[in-house]
Image (tube, helix red, strand yellow):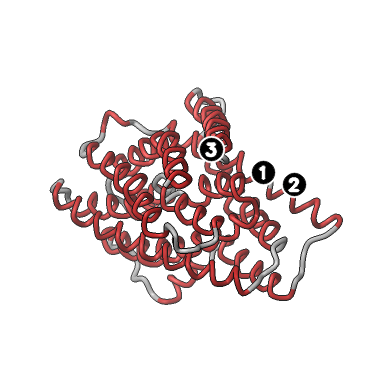
Amino acid sequence: MEGFDTIVHNIMLLAAVMAVGFAAVKTGYIGVEVKNAISKVIVRIALPVLILNALTGIELTAERLRNAGIVVIIALAAIILLYGIGIISSKLFKMPETTAVRHRCMMSFGNVAFLGYPLIRALFGDEGFFYAAVFEVVNDAFVWTFVVCRLNMLGKRDKMTPKIILKNVTNPCTVAFVISFIMMLFGWRFTGFAKELTDGVGGMTTWLSMLFIGGTLAEVRASKTSNISSIFVIVLIKMIIMPVLIILATRGMGIDSAARGAAILQVAVPSQTIISVLTLEYGGDTVYTSVGILITTLAGLVTMPLVYYLMCAI
């Protein structure tokens, strides 16, 4: 099946780099502080440059804007539905409120940048990357407003004012997306030396991301968590059932294949790594979130090729 070998190949390649990061941190060859520094390089430099470089190479048309609107609708529907399901499942598992909120967040928000971007760009090129970035903006808008406010309420930290919310939403990646959109409107592109520079810096994103995820997984102690079965519910619902429902719902609707594929795979990615970081920041069940990221990431090595196969077959 066209594209299936590509996603399997890329999953295996990304898994191999993750294994390098895992081994490096686990053995102490790379310290945790270096792993955290890699995260900052990704978020503050490499990923914003990748967004600028990839998106400005695309011509903005009415058709792409229409497709982007469809991606926004799919993203909103998936996030809201998954959060609602997370509320129900957390009650069924009788979780304490601090764990329940984190369970709902892991159910709703995926690793759309660190893992989604490399795969979608490999499968659908810069066209798919554009729609993946649109999905990521919706995802991050929720994370840096709703999720931060919700966790802040649990941690009883500073009051979340509009100024603080705006500061969280205004991160390097969202700024890069806005700048890219403006450049696309005016047809501005990187050329010559600037193009070579952005190609090189942005190209680091995939490999640094996988090293970071592998290093993060090395810090997890799965044996110390409770409610581990609820994490497998996240895998089943978020990473398999919800993508399949979207596949069925969008079948035969005439949606652009790159937009549809990017949206479906963004929903299918493992739980977002930043949830663990925010848990550490605001206090709570850090073990549960860390184990959740470990299990969903490892499961994604199987479930994402499965979802892609079903997307092509149905």
Residue at 49% over, 34% down: 214
Q: Which residue is mark 2?
A: 200
Labels 2 & 3 near each other (Cβ < 8 A): no
The residue located at (56%, 34%) in the rendering is 5
Question: Foreground mark, 2 or 3?
Answer: 3
How many tags in the picture?
3
* Residue under numbered circle 1: 204
Q: Is residue 233 above or below residue 198?
A: above
State the image quarter where residue 190 is shown. bottom right
Residue for point 47% across, 26% down: 26
Q: Is residue 211 visible?
A: no
Q: Earlier in the sequence, mark 2 or mark 3?
A: 3
Dot 3 corresponds to which residue?
1
Q: Amino acid at mark 2?
A: Gly
Please rate how many residues cluster around mark 1, counting C-alpha atoms within 10 Å: few if below 14, some from 14 to 19, many from 20.
Answer: some
Badge 3 vs badge 1, beta-carbon distance below 8 Å: no
User: In the displayed structure, would residue 146 be above or below residue 40?
Assistant: below
Residue 206, image x, y percentages: 60, 43
Q: Specify the quadrant of the image occupied by residue 184.
A: bottom right
- Choose the circle earlier in sequence order: 3 or 1: 3
Mark 3 or mark 1, which is nearer to you? 3
Q: Position of residue 39 (x, y in %)?
A: 55, 46
Helix, strand or loop for disc 1: loop
Residue 141 or 6: which is nearer the viewer? 6
Report the Cα–Cα distance between label 2 and label 3: 32 Å
**Cβ–Cβ under 8 Å for marks 1 and 2:** yes
- Towards the viewer: 310 or 241: 310
Amino acid found under the numbered disc labelled 1: Met
Left or right, 125 with respect to 265, comes to right
